[in-house]
Image (cartoon, rainbow, N blue to C red):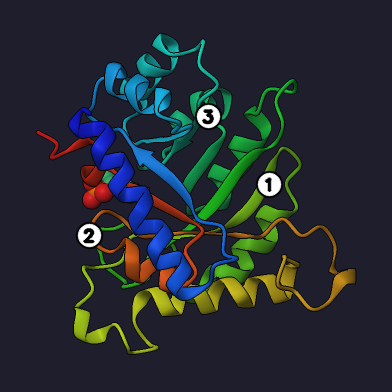
Amino acid sequence: MSTLIENLKNVRACIHAHKNEHNAAQTVTLLAVSKKKPSSAIKEAFDAGQTAFGENYLQEALDKIETLKKLPIEWHFIGNMQSNKTREISTHFDWAHTVDRLKIAKRLSDQRPSHLPPLNICIQVNIDNEPSKAGIPEGDILALAKDINALPNITLRGLMAIPKPIDTNEANNNDHAFARMQQHLSALQAQLGGKNSSDKNIGESNIDTLSMGMSNDMGLAIQHGATIVRIGTAIFGERT
Ligand SMILES: *Cc1c(COP(=O)(O)O)cnc(C)c1O
């Protein structure tokens, strides 16, 4: 068995184990982050049953999407969002995880081709208030979510974050970044509707996604309700 296939099996087993320990009914989707890795590696993972892939760099991603266009891959954009990239993202991707401005969301909605279903969107939260990272402050989530939820050609699915490396001593602390993200998703579902919302009259329940957890912290993220983990290195090896 190749290293990649073995890694993929190990990551799946790890997700499964953490999920069962926490909540066996939870859906956790593995997003394979293939940035800086060749199309041949994506094809190999696809042949082993992996269908969702995440890319950060637009031009690199478009080249791979073109090369692999015969495969029914679900493409997720997880890189930095800029206005001049929205048309290509809206045309070629199924998901965008890093939306942090209404202007960007409006462009994605306006530019979504009419023959495609709405683009799935997550709002990126700068959960540790790091100046180097994109995302909105925690306090702005609800207002932006309400505005985005009203746009026609995108579907707000939930929240995404890239926390600082989490000290394992903090893992039992309900105030660490993953725990707070879980609380923010619940609050959003309570306000806008979602599968855990108790008010069934609240409208469409499309808010079901917490995109968090990478190679080094996927277990803790799953414990705190991650529904999409974004895993690169543990599947494809170190990037150069
Ligand atoms: C690169 C990247 C990942 C994957 O990180 P690994 O540590 O390689 O698993 C996940 N999410 C985002 C936003 C990334 O840029």
Give amino acid for label 2: Asn
Respond yes or no on whether mark 1 lies under 8 Å from ligand 1: no
Of 209 and 105, which appears nearest the observer? 209
Of 18 and 1, which appears nearest the observer? 1
Disc 2 designates what residue?
216
For the N terminus, the image quarter is top left
Residue shown at 22% from the left, 35% from the top: 236
Residue shown at 44% from the left, 33% from the top: 50
For the C terminus, the image quarter is top left
Nearest to the eye among marks 2 and 3: give it.
2
Residue 31 location, x and y as percent?
42, 43
Query: Which label belongs to residue 93?
Result: 3
Respond yes or no on whether mark 2 lies under 8 Å from ligand 1: yes
Residue shown at 84% from the left, 76% from the top: 199
Q: Are marks 2 and 3 in contact (CB under 8 Å)?
A: no
Disc 1 designates what residue?
155
Q: Can residue 123 be seen at all in this image of the molecule?
A: yes
Marked residue nearer the N-terminal end (2 or 3): 3
- Mark 2, Cα crowd under 10 Å, few <14 / some 14-19 / many 20+, is few
Residue 67 location, x and y as percent?
39, 10
